[in-house]
Image: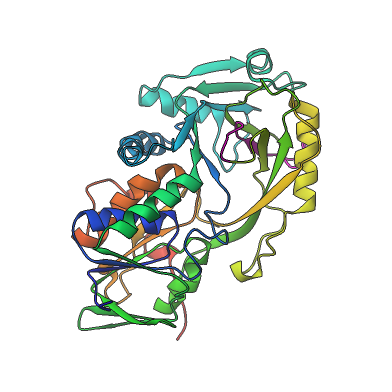
């Protein structure tokens, strides 16, 4: 294999593979370097399902979810395996609560701004139509019919397959990046597998983002977290849930935020997945991940299922974890930008980092490919840019 490429992508998870796919479509040579094996369970793509949803408290995020849909449709043409199970999105809970997901009222305003259809719900509607019970009487909600459960496993496998078939795309696993240098406009990327060169870099290593950025002597402020998930057996085989999220007051609820999925045939058939959306023990370094579910978080989750869901067993029979990095910058759902101006060749380094972004996988791949090959994207990424003051330079 020639060690010289047009673009090197660091990180072979969903964003890296989607970027390589879009780059390869433009006949540019691209190398993807993955620190582990491809399709591994050690990063932010662990597990098999994610939520696709349109409700967001900000109109620009609603727009991005809508803009991502055609790219999912195009990707679906390459496989008979459904990449999405369209079951709708349900948001409900205390209307005064603002969480990491936003706020129900703000989401309604954003949906209205972009003329997206949805239904406003009372607590009675939520209990009668969606199988929840014993909810506080002040709870309200919204239902948006285009929400879906993403078959993340199938999505990753498809992107890996498409890239493997493209002669412009080269995939190298077990190749952690240990050094990055730039000489005469070319990046020299060192790994245990050799040194590879390209005039353009795309950095998408998921929760290992700062492990790579430190090689360029800067980092971004993130919280590392091992998210736990629990699977509850369906005692009523006919019951089905949409994708959902509940907004609760942390003072009044043990483990205040939870979300869930429908039963699907690709992820423990006959079970419903419910997960906590709160950090109990943040990690200082992703290398410290235990790969073990947090017993306290699972306990809170099981209690919530027992108190408020129907047709399910009350003891989780399967569990999983996912290692993620969340931005510490207020109102930054995800980070998409070029490297800061003081980094040599900053205009040739595109970065995606942090956040909940599986719903945007094929679209973000297109944006990253455009940023790498064209040095820009026509899409407005201003809400996702950090700005100089949010990057921290590391001392030499």
Residue at x-position 49% and y-position 31%: 85
Does residue 385 show up?
no
Does 258 appear in magenta?
yes
Instruction: Judge by depth and name the residue closer to the eye, 325 or 102.
Output: 325
Residue 320 position, x and y percent, is: 67, 51
Does residue 150 show up?
yes
Q: Is residue 76 left or right of residue 5?
A: right
Residue at x-position 75% and y-position 54%: 294
Residue range in magenta is: 250-266
Q: Is residue 60 left or right of residue 264?
A: left
Quadrant in the picture for residue 41: bottom right
**Looking at the rendering, in which quadrant would you find the N terminus?**
bottom left
Instruction: Judge by depth and name the residue closer to the eye, 208 or 42.
Output: 42
The correct choice, above or below, for 141 with respect to 354 in the image is above
Q: How is the image coloured?
A: rainbow
Instruction: Judge by depth and name the residue closer to the eye, 324 or 231.
Output: 231
Residue 238 position, x and y percent, is: 66, 20
Instruction: Judge by depth and name the residue closer to the eye, 250 or 297.
Output: 297
**Looking at the rendering, in which quadrant would you find the C terminus?**
bottom left
Does 331 appear in magenta?
no
The correct choice, above or below, for 109 with respect to 348 in the image is above
Residue 159 position, x and y percent, is: 38, 52
Residue 22 position, x and y percent, is: 27, 53
Q: How many marks?
A: 0
Residue at x-position 44% and y-position 70%: 173
Residue at x-position 69% and y-position 24%: 237
Quadrant in the picture for residue 72: top left
Magenta part mainly helix, strand or loop?
Answer: loop
């Amino acid at each position: 294999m020639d060690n010289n490429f047009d673009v090197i992508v660091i990180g072979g998870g969903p964003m890296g593979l989607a970027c390589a796919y879009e780059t390869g479509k433009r006949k540019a040579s691209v190398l993807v370097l993955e620190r582990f094996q491809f399709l591994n369970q050690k990063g932010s793509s662990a597990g098999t399902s994610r939520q696709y949803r349109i409700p967001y408290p900000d109109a620009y995020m609603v727009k991005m979810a809508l803009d991502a849909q055609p790219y999912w449709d195009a990707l679906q043409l390459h496989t008979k395996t459904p990449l999405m199970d369209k079951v709708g999105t349900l948001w409900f809970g205390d209307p005064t609560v603002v969480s990491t997901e936003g706020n129900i009222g703000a989401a309604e305003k954003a949906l209205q701004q972009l003329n997206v259809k949805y239904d406003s719900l009372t607590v009675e509607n939520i209990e009668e139509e969606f199988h929840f019970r014993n909810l506080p009487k002040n709870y309200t909600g919204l239902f948006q019919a285009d929400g879906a459960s993403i078959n993340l496993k199938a999505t990753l496998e498809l992107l890996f397959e498409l890239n493997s078939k493209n002669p412009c795309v080269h995939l190298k696993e077990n190749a952690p990046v240990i050094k990055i240098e730039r000489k005469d406009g070319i990046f020299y990327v060192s790994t245990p597998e050799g040194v590879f060169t390209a005039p353009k870099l795309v950095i998408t290593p998921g929760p290992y983002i700062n492990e790579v950025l430190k090689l360029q002597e800067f980092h971004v402020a993130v919280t590392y977290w091992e998210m736990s998930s629990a699977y509850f057996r369906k005692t009523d085989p006919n019951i089905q849930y949409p994708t959902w999220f509940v907004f609760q007051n942390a003072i009044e609820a043990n483990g205040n935020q939870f979300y869930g999925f429908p039963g699907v045939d690709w992820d423990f058939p006959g079970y419903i997945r419910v997960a906590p959306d709160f950090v109990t023990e943040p990690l200082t370094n992703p290398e410290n991940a235990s790969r073990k579910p947090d017993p306290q978080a699972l306990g809170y989750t099981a209690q919530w299922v027992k108190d408020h869901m129907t047709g399910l067993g009350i003891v989780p029979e399967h569990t999983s974890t996912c290692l993620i990095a969340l931005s510490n910058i207020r109102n930054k759902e995800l980070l998409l930008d070029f490297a800061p101006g003081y980094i040599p060749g900053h205009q040739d380094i595109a970065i995606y980092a942090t956040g909940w972004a599986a719903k945007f996988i094929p679209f973000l791949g297109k944006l990253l490919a455009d940023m790498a090959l064209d040095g820009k994207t026509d899409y407005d990424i201003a809400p996702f840019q950090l700005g100089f003051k949010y990057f921290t330079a590391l001392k030499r």
